[in-house]
Amino acid sequence: MKTTLKPIYLTQLHPGDNCKVNKICAGYNATRRLYEMGLNTGANIKVVKNDIGPIILSLSGNKIAIGRGLAEKIIVEN
């Protein structure tokens, strides 16, 4: 019997969680924008804030804010 893992979206993580970007399921322009910010496949990120409003991430020592709609399209692995 095959077991399929449910994807973990960036919005499901808690502050302090470290993860790795697995896949970005967005359109061309949104994906390009994320890649230009350094948030590409394989990037290691840490969630700084995830309560109300945008999600704040730490990426290579820099803090970036991602809106919730865009964060829903980023699949991560712990």
Image (tube, rainbow, N blue to C red):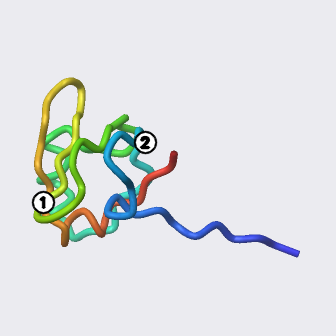
Q: CA distance from mark 2 to mark 1?
A: 19 Å
Residue 52 pos. (x, y %): 15, 65
Please provide percent x and percent y for residue 43. 35, 37
Q: Report the residue at 33% width, 67% height from top.
A: 25
Q: Where is 34 relative to 25, above or below?
A: above
Q: Residues within 10 Å of mark 2 (few under 14, many from 20)?
A: some
For image coordinates 41% across by 56% down, the residue present is 23
Hey, what amino acid is under mark 1? Pro
Give the residue furthest to the right. Answer: 1
As drawn, the label of residue 20 is 2
Which x, y percent locates residue 73?
30, 67
Secondary-structure class at tag 2: strand
Q: Is residue 58 above or below residue 61?
A: below
- Residue 21 horizontal side relative to residue 65, left or right: right
Look at discs 2 and 1 and give the one toward the viewer. Answer: 1
Say whether disc 2 or disc 1 marks the residue closer to the N-terminus.
2
The amino acid on which the numbered mark 2 sits, given as a three-letter code, is Lys
Q: Nearer the viewer, residue 29 or 64?
A: 64
Q: Secondary structure at mark 1?
A: loop
- In the picture of the structure, the residue carrying the numbered disc 1 is 54
Give the residue displayed 88% in from the left and 75% down from the top. Answer: 1
- Camera-side residue of 37 and 58: 58
